[in-house]
Amino acid sequence: MNLYIDIDGVLLTKQGQPSPHLKEFLIEATTKHNPFWLTTHCKGDLLHVTSHLKRILPQDLWEYIEKIKPTNWDVLKTDGINFDQDFRWFDDAPMESEKKLLQEKGVLDKLILIDLKNNPDSLKDVLLKI
Ligand SMILES: [Mg+2]
């Protein structure tokens, strides 16, 4: 399945630290699924996103983040989603207009909200859903 993955507030906490259970999440996402970045750190190319993450994440995680593919989008993150294929989108703060678009397409349930503040184990819990 295609997975669309945000970084800030999802893979990294708001404080910029790696989220709990990040390694298990990345292993699952990159070995069993087809993962894509859907983050302001990536608009069409990988250079910025991977160098940004390599500054923060330990080296044993680099091989997984290198398997995640780029998306290209402009205003709405939903422009980076391929709606012809099944997907899950992991994000902490989708915009109302993005949620409305998902609703109109009947795929709002594909959006998986990550709330690390209220549930630090969010990444572990969502592993059960993908
Ligand atoms: Mg975010």
Image (spheres, rainbow, N blue to C red):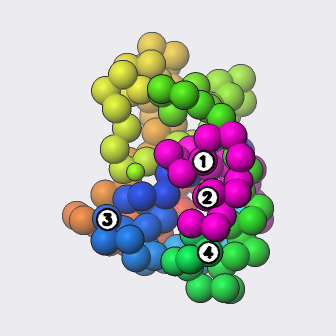
The residues tagged by marks 4 and 3 sit, at their Cα atoms, a distance apart of 17 Å
For the magenta stretch, what is the residue range? 31-52
The residues tagged by marks 1 and 4 sit, at their Cα atoms, a distance apart of 14 Å
The residues tagged by marks 1 and 3 sit, at their Cα atoms, a distance apart of 18 Å
2 or 3: tag closer to the N-terminus? 3
In the image, taking residue 28 as reference, residue 57 lies left or right, namely left
Q: Name the residue under label 2.
A: 49
Q: Quadrant of the N terminus?
A: top right
2 or 4: tag closer to the N-terminus? 2
The amino acid on which the numbered mark 4 sits, given as a three-letter code, is Lys
Q: Is residue 25 visible?
A: no
Q: Name the residue under label 3.
A: 14
1 or 3: tag closer to the N-terminus? 3
**Residue 66, located in which quarter of the rendered image?**
bottom right
The amino acid on which the numbered mark 2 sits, given as a three-letter code, is Val
In the image, taking residue 74 as reference, residue 1 lies left or right, namely right
60 and 107: which is toward the camera: 60
The residues tagged by marks 2 and 3 sit, at their Cα atoms, a distance apart of 17 Å
Q: Mark 1 points at which residue?
A: 42
The secondary structure type at the circle numbered 3 is loop
The residues tagged by marks 1 and 2 sit, at their Cα atoms, a distance apart of 6 Å
- State if disc 3 and disc 4 touch (CB < 8 Å): no
Give the percent coordinates (x, y) of residue 102.
Answer: 46, 23
4 or 3: tag closer to the N-terminus? 3
Give the percent coordinates (x, y) of residue 46.
Answer: 71, 53
The secondary structure type at the circle numbered 1 is loop
Q: Mark 4 points at which residue?
A: 54
